[in-house]
Image (tube, coloured by chain):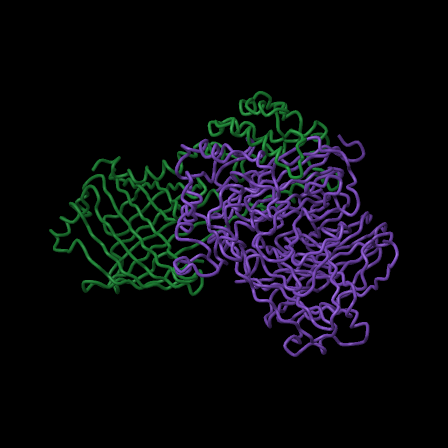
Chain colours: A green, B purple
Amino acid sequence: MSRSAALSILLAIFSAEAFGQRADHAHEVHDELEDHAAHAEHDGHAEHDGHDGHDGYDREDARGAHDGHDGRGDRGELDGTDHEGHDAREGRDDHDGHAAGAAPGGFLDVPPQAPPPAAAFSGPAYAADVMFGAEEMAAAREQMRVEQGGFRTKMILADRFEAGFGDGDERFVWDAQGWYGGDLHKLWWKSEGAGQIGSNPDDAEVQVLYSRAVTPWFDFQAGVRHDYEPPPRRTHAVFGVQGLLPYVFEIDAAAFVSEDGDWTARFEAEYDLRLKQRLVLQPRIEMSFSAQAIPELEIGSGLGSVEGGLRLRYELRRELAPYIGLGWERNVGSTADFLRAAGEDPRGWKLIAGVRAWF
Amino acid sequence: MDTNFNRRRLLYTAALAGAGWSLSSLLPAWARTGTPGVTAPDMPTLTGDEIALTVGRSRFMVGGRAGHAVTINGTLPAPLIRLQEGQHVRLAVTNNLDEDTSIHWHGLLLPFHMDGVPGVSFPGIRAGETFVYEFPIRHAGTFWYHSHSNLQEQIGHYGPMILDPAGPDPVEYDREHVVVLSDWSFMHPHTIMAKLKKEEGYFNYQRETLARVLKRTAPSPLSLADWRMWQRMRMDPTDIADVTGATYTYLVNGHGPQENWTGLFRPGERVRLRLINASGMTIFNVRVPGLPMTVVNADGNNVVPVEVDELQIAVAETYDVIVQPSEDRAYTLAAESVDRSGMARATLAPRLGMTAPVPPLRRRPTLGMDDMGMGGTDHSEAGHSEGDADDAHAGHGASAVTTPDAELPDVEDAHAAQAGHDADDAVAAGSSSGGHAPMTMRDKSLAPPDMHVGVGVDMIAMNPQDAAGKRGLGLEDVGHRVLVYSDLVALDPNPDPRPPSRSIEIHLTGNMERFMWSFDGRRFSEVVEPIRFARDERVRVTLVNDTMMQHPIHLHGHFFEIVTGRPGRHPRKHTVNVLPGSKIAFDLTADAPGDWAFHCHLLFHMHAGMFNVVTVRPLDGGAT
């Protein structure tokens, strides 16, 4: 399997979710803390005049009454990058007409949408500065800015913390992740591992990622992954997407390139089928791919393994849900050959008991 | 109207205390829990030109459980402040907290630097400091006051305020009660916010489930196909309220349903109920089974009396209603949360200890096509509940404002225009009726050019309908009279007869899954351009709700006139609730120079970023 094929699922998701929104991406430089300085300088007319002739506004001329600024001047430059997204401008014009005409009670003489008159830009940028002093108000303003959308939150989720029983095997598995940050930018970590119950893990990894919201439902993630087990220890670069597909499938798909240049990929999907208010049936599938054979890890090229699971959990609280389930794993292709050669069964069933928890 | 001015100043049930009774000893045992809540009716009424208020921490008990509250003068709700139109008041507010606080005088017309919003009107009140608010009382009505700092409002920092008119009150009444509705949680508001950010449906225990859909049992009117459609959109048709009775206890004057706050009357009296919704997040359906309510005042402004059986009061709104119980019996005042997950309950009775049956919670509503911004299009069966699905359509039609069809964009054309949009945003709306091409839920071409359609915008209303004449969410099909905004007719002619000179459109935007809320796609924290008005200009502002939630939008320092089709007599309000996927217009005379907060009054929506500043320039004194 070629590299591009190994990453095809990843790309398919990413193109559907993210590329369709690339215009947003440019726009988002306005996020969070950036551009604060620009705002501080923003006290009116002079700056607005500077926006005359932005191509973003040329199109608005058709709507009438726009004279080069619309009272949103400090974003004008950014708007200019975004207008591929607004090609259907004619349709919008119709909508405007509707907005004006559809006011109830036969208000057909609603005036056109227009920017504020010049007087609206006169006077101080911040009225309270006049009464209380600019310095004191600036501190209060910053605090208020953070309180209205600029705060950060954190989460730790033990998605699977479980024991599996099958074929005389008794293994534990953990699959946890967490994040810290604002709505758009987060520091994200993930850790997965497994081992024989009573022994040290024979499989353990940690990822540390920067996670950037790129669409309403998806984050793009990039960072590093370190494998502690099995030996040899390796470090990978990670590129992935995580989020919700239509029909509320939770997706986590990532490509990894190791320090040795080996390309691998992983795809996970979960779906929460709510049977009752607190009872959730969760089908889950995980697939791993490799662009090349990695003999020392007993990995063949192409699709390496498929793991399925069906977990039934009961939410004692939203944060704490014990579950039972059934898991199924199958190694395929040359990965399976490696396992057979080692005398292991490339497929297996297991019963699962575990807990999902977050805080 | 000036005659028969025979009201008596009987406030709360404090009248009883005046008669020398000990209120708590008169309550039935189950209500005599010794909570500060039960003693709240005894709380003082503050009047005069000099008023001292102290913000501090208190224990608050409800339902037998104690929690931490932030209170003013130690009570929850805060003391009633009663002032007279024409007086000049000084309110000295001392902060005994270990963090900043503030008091915003909600709905009052006053100088901008007395409005009490830290970072907009003033720097805030630091710990240990006293700030003196000083302003003239320019008008009359029912108002309230609350913190604008650090979510303190959710944990008790709110109280009622009555401004009495300088002249005779055109409203005739024999007795009055203040009814402060609110929501209380033992979970700290920052924790509530964090839960919502991590799992948006955290508090919703009325979700659609497979068990319900397969059986189509109440309250689900959804077919399997409808459910699939909602799943495809990654939306939840049961997301009526973000924070619910799962954590909230709903209060009347600081009393939980068990404590049963009781307001007294003598049969035959005209009783004025001053309803104030001081909740953090809860919109209430208010009714008094057996008694019609005559609405006489909305947001502090008198309206032509209109009789209804139920009204929906959004967060931050006030309504004064007159009830006239003629029988010697008790009546229940039921204030059901909009998602029907709980109820605030009080009793109106001739004597303490009397109770009336409490109506059961009704079925929770389910979002439908109107709420998706597809009003005016063919309805799928995903209509609202309450009654069976077929009747729901008729109810919608009847309650919707009549808009000539010619003014509606051609739906079929809209479909055609949207063909080719990326499948991600498309949804087979009306899937159960089968005949529709996919419609897009996030057609960027419908957004104004200055709106930022990014991560924080999960929907753009395709065909938002004017909701001024529409019943509140979940009340579309109830079989009695429900107040709608277009029922409200200003008693006095609107003060500014000029037609608006320009229009602006503000989109209410959000991402339900990520719990992001904003105006025009930008959270306030992103440093947004303010909404600018020239002083005294008259502007038509249309609020377009691009989300599937309600947003009570509040403008500080002004009244605006909701455009209901009665020019010159439009109801003047400070807060207007915009229904999901709908729009509403108001005319504003920007006559108060300064900077003013403008925000969704759902506390956690504001906290998430649905906030902006309105500037009115030039300021006084020729500042240029």
Quadrant housing the N terminus of chain A: top left
Residue at the image point whose x is 63% and y is 26% from the top: A47
Q: Going by the picture, which residue comes out furthest to the right?
A: B3
The percent position of residue B245, horizontal first and vertical second, equals 55, 62
The percent position of residue B452, horizontal first and vertical second, equals 53, 35
The percent position of residue B233, horizontal first and vertical second, equals 43, 45
Name the image quarter holding residue B184: bottom right
Quadrant housing the C terminus of chain A: bottom left
The percent position of residue B100, horizontal first and vertical second, equals 66, 53
Choose between A63 and B356: the one closer to the eye.
B356
Choose between A288 and B509: the one closer to the eye.
B509
Position of residue B352 in the picture relative to residue A162 (left or right): right
Number of numbered discs visible in the structure rendering: 0
Depicted B550 relative to depicted A122: above or below = below
Residue at the image point whose x is 49% and y is 52% from the top: B390
Depicted A340 relative to depicted B181: above or below = above
State whether residue B129 appears in this view: no
Choose between A320 and B465: the one closer to the eye.
B465
Choose between B58 and B367: the one closer to the eye.
B367
Position of residue B531 in the picture relative to residue B375 (left or right): right
